[in-house]
Image (cartoon, helix red, strand yellow):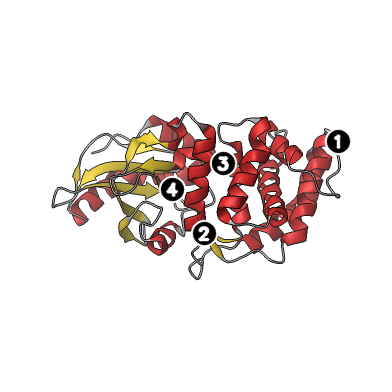
Amino acid sequence: MIDIPGGLVTAQEKYNGAAGRAFVAALPARTAEFLARWELRRDGEPAHGVSALVLPVLRADGTPAALKFPFPDEESAGEADALRAWAGAGAVLLLDHDPETRALLLERLDPARTLAREPDSRAAVRITGRLLAGLTAHRAPAGLRGLGALARAMLERTPRALESIADPRVRRLVADCAAAVREVADEPGDRLLHWDLHFGNVLGGDRARWLAIDPKPLAGDPGFELFPALGDRFEAGEVVWRFDALTALLGLDRERARAWTLGRVLQNCLWDAEDGRRPADVPLEIARRLRWNQWLTP
């Protein structure tokens, strides 16, 4: 039997309610099932994020690996497809997968070697940009959720969210972000996006110095990828430098990339407004720092 980390239990209760409780309750039996099915032995204590349990294991031949059980939502639906498409180039290598439960067997990376511990934030941004350039060079696999539908849904939700934002300056900024998304929504792109490549989702490995983990894949425009690296270890004065560095490394059109970055700001603001919270300061400041176009005036 495995003891489920309390942090995962709390997170699942908070974000997924009854479905989260059912997911957690099934994990001990599911872990035992896949240890036997894939001939694995436990090799350390479990780790977790908000939405997944990860267990270090050894394969039958003694090779270290990691057994991952993600919460079965729309964000984890395409994880195996994305990892299979990348085939270990810039991302953790997929060793096995069960489509029914979404269990993943992955190569073992070193959680102590995370880009979040890189002391030079500009170096961390450049590393993230180089990884994103390689990952987004791939066309998204068929059937993956798309940025176009996501953008349309955000625009449909915006009017009601704006009504709930009391501060007129914040309301105007969120409306400006929606206007930016409208400009590009009809051309959402077809690249394979990671969606969540913050510094903590880059780990060191034996075969590569840095590899991406934990994708929440989308089919879309690479400009939608930049936001996590702009907000991680946030420095307001670095926003434009980071944006310029990332767009250069990925070879992006700066105006389109800025519009899709403002789309990520909109996404975060909608989540906050719909939960009854004031939109968070960091996304709003990123939007302020990027508003140099004529329809985003001070």
For discs 1 and 2, the disc positioned in front in the rendered view: 2
Q: Is the residue under label 4 in contact with that under label 2 (CB below 8 Å)? A: no
- Residue 214 badge: 4
The residue to which callout 1 is attached is: 168
Between the C-alphas of marks 3 and 2, the distance is 15 Å
Q: Amino acid at mark 1?
A: Pro
Q: Is the residue under label 2 in contact with that under label 1 (CB below 8 Å)? A: no
User: Which tag, 3 or 1, sits closer to the chain's start?
Assistant: 1
The residue to which callout 3 is attached is: 229
Instruction: Name the spot of residue 174 as percent of width and height, x first.
Output: 77, 43
Q: Quadrant of the N terminus?
A: top left
Secondary element at image label 1: helix
Instruction: Name the spot of residue 154 as percent of width and height, x first.
Output: 70, 54
**Res. 40 in view:** yes
Q: Amino acid at mark 3?
A: Ala
Vertical relation: 250 (above or below) 127: below
Between the C-alphas of marks 2 and 4, the distance is 15 Å
Q: Amino acid at mark 2?
A: Thr
Q: Amino acid at mark 4?
A: Asp
The residue to which callout 2 is attached is: 136
